[in-house]
Image: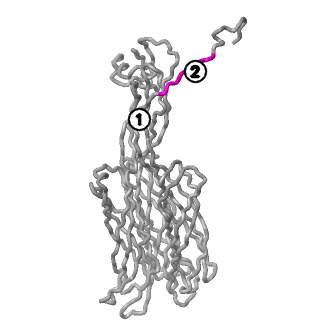
């Protein structure tokens, strides 16, 4: 714009910035602990293992299984720093091999391999982390008859729990506001309990006529069967699944004959986790249990009175971490305006999650494999299974878990030589969940319960594996939080006591009332509305 004469006086006046007056907010503060995120990292390293002096020279490795421990399993982690988190622990390797000696019976070695890893975790917030190690894969090669090399792939999972204060806007002090309210529900971790139950049971071998001599390999998995929550305690019923590979000798007429056998045993236990007085009577929306059975061991014991009675004895403890989640529902103010003043605020969006459903299912793997050319099998000896990878998702009314499991079967040929066959087989399981819908967030924990091998004929072997699947679904929603409420002193446009407007497409009655600084009730009354107005509808607005 140009001026032919002098610049008018009003154009020389500086623009006046609107005056901002901070308002005193009324807030309700609630402290919650919630599962913030889950991070996973893979770490790979190599280690040379020496055969102990008491063991014969190594010729061929039949199978190798590994499990990992971590110390400590719970750590406090800080957000976005350059500090590396030290992860330390021990890997237990169980190796079964054929030796160079004349004795054809397999030999076992149990090796402890310490590890250390520095993890740049970088959580979003200050959090408590619960760390779970897992062995994803083990590769091995024989260097010489007294040494073998292992290449171990570890997978660390960190479940992070954040504790924070959420400030919910409730209004202004001494100032009336029109406020839009929405109901919101959130699941928060209300209580963590740790407890352990002792296990001390004996059981007999199932092979008739064979007396256990020594154990070559032992594996354990623990899973929940059912739970009951009372006013004073959480009752957990579960099973310890024990898989044994052992050497046995015949008694009586066949004395001196030895055999390698597998025994799968299921041991039931019941755990009572007490609740303190202040936590009794709450409505827990979800309970999650995690077990640790790394101090369980099996030994062979002979009856002092009856020397022929030889039994297995499993002894140790099962540690449980019980997470109790509480569903909290509240009203959240997501928008507001003042009928007389210009009201402004900042809108902060936050995500909350709700555990919606949980279920248990099972899956099985069965595969018949042909043995190598020229080999003839005499018996199936042992089988172990390990979950390699898995995915989970939801369909309409169902949760689906699929993945692959690695199985290793040991068998003996007709020449008395022990051999091994390995397969990787796909599995799939479904759990009925009425509330499950496609795209819903779902988590699962597949565990191998039992694995066994059976001889079909001298050329075929059947490998079986059963898995337990614990599935849980949750819904994530976004809530709007009001921050920094304030009034802005700016020139008021001319307003009319009544006006006729056309409802815009997609516009809500709340938005229309906010635009003209009236109320939804007044618009409904002035237009005798019984239903929500639609786009294009003309409405009378009375101030």
Q: Going 49% across and 36% down the picture, which residue do you hit?
A: 348
- Where disc 2 sits, the SS reads loop
Label 1: how many residues lie within 10 Å, few (<14), some (14-19) or many (20+)? some
What colour scheme does the image use? one colour
Name the residue furthest top: 5
Cα–Cα gap, marks 1 and 2: 29 Å
- Where disc 1 sits, the SS reads strand
**Residue in the foreground of this view, choosing between 224 and 103:** 224
Residue 358 is inside the magenta segment: no
* Image disc number at residue 436: none
**Residue in the foreground of this view, choosing between 84 and 268:** 84
Q: Going 50% across and 25% down the picture, which residue do you hit?
A: 21
Q: Position of residue 86 (x, y in %)?
A: 56, 61
Magenta stretch in the rendered image? 14-22
User: Which corner quadrant of the image does residue 214 belong to?
Assistant: bottom left
**Residue in the foreground of this view, choosing between 346 and 307:** 346
* Image disc number at residue 27: 1
Vertical placement of residue 143 versus 448, above or below: below
Name the residue furthest right: 4
Counting residues from the N terminus, which is met first, the one under dot 1 or under dot 2? 2
* Label 1–label 2 contact, CB within 8 A: no
Q: The C terminus is located in which quarter?
A: top left
* Image disc number at residue 17: 2
59 sits left or right of 260 in the view: right
Residue 17 is inside the magenta segment: yes
**Residue in the foreground of this view, choosing between 254 and 474:** 474
Vertical placement of residue 325 versus 539, above or below: below
Label 2: how many residues lie within 10 Å, few (<14), some (14-19) or many (20+)? few
Q: Going 30% across and 51% down the picture, which residue do you hit?
A: 278
The answer to whether residue 10 of the structure is visible from this angle is yes
């Amino acid at each position: 714009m140009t001026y032919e004469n002098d610049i008018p006086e009003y154009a020389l006046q500086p623009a006046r910035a609107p005056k901002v007056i901070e308002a005193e907010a009324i807030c309700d503060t609630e402290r919650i602990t919630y599962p913030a995120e889950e991070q996973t990292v893979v770490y790979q390293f190599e280690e040379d293992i020496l055969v102990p002096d008491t063991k014969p020279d190594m010729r061929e490795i039949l199978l190798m299984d590994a499990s990992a421990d971590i110390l400590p399993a719970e750590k406090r982690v800080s957000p976005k720093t350059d500090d590396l988190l030290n992860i330390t622990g021990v890997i237990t390797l169980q190796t079964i091999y054929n030796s160079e000696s004349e004795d054809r019976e397999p030999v076992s070695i149990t090796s402890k391999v310490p590890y250390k890893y520095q993890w740049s975790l970088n959580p979003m917030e200050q959090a408590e982390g619960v760390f779970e190690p897992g062995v994803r894969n083990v590769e091995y090669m024989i260097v010489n008859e007294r040494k073998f090399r292992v290449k171990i792939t570890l997978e660390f999972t960190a479940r992070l729990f954040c504790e924070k204060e959420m400030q919910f806007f409730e209004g202004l002090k001494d100032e009336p506001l029109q406020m839009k309210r929405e109901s919101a529900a959130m699941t928060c971790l209300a209580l963590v309990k740790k407890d352990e139950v002792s296990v001390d049971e004996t059981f007999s071998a199932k092979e008739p006529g064979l007396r256990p001599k020594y154990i070559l390999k032992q594996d354990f998995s623990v899973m929940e069967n059912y739970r009951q929550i009372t006013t004073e305690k959480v009752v957990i019923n579960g099973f310890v699944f024990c898989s044994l590979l052992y050497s046995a000798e015949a008694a009586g007429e066949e004395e001196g004959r030895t055999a390698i056998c597998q025994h799968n045993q299921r041991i039931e236990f019941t755990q009572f986790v007490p609740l303190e007085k202040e936590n009794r009577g709450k409505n827990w929306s979800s309970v999650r249990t995690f077990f640790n059975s790394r101090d369980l061991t099996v030994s062979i014991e002979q009856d002092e009175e009856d020397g022929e009675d030889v039994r297995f004895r499993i002894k140790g403890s099962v540690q449980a971490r019980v997470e109790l989640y509480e569903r909290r529902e509240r009203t959240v103010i997501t928008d507001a305006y003042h009928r007389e003043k210009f009201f402004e605020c900042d809108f902060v969006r936050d995500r909350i999650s709700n555990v919606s459903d949980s279920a248990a299912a099972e899956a099985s793997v069965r595969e018949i494999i042909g043995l190598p050319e020229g080999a003839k099998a005499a018996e199936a000896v042992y089988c172990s299974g390990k979950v390699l990878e898995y995915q989970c998702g939801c369909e309409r009314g169902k949760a689906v878990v699929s993945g692959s499991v690695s199985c290793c079967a040991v068998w003996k040929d007709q020449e008395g030589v022990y051999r091994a066959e390995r397969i990787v087989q796909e599995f799939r399981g479904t759990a009925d969940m009425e509330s499950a819908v496609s795209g819903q967030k779902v988590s699962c924990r597949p565990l191998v319960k039992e694995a066994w091998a059976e001889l079909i004929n001298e050329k075929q072997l059947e490998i079986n594996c059963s898995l337990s699947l614990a599935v849980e679904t949750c819904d994530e929603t976004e809530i709007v939080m009001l921050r920094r409420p304030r009034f802005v002193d700016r020139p008021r446009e001319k307003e009319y006591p009544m006006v006729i407007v056309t409802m815009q497409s997609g516009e809500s009655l709340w938005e229309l009332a906010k635009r003209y600084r009236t109320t939804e009730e007044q618009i409904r009354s002035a237009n005798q509305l019984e239903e929500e107005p639609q786009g294009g509808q003309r409405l009378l607005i009375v101030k």
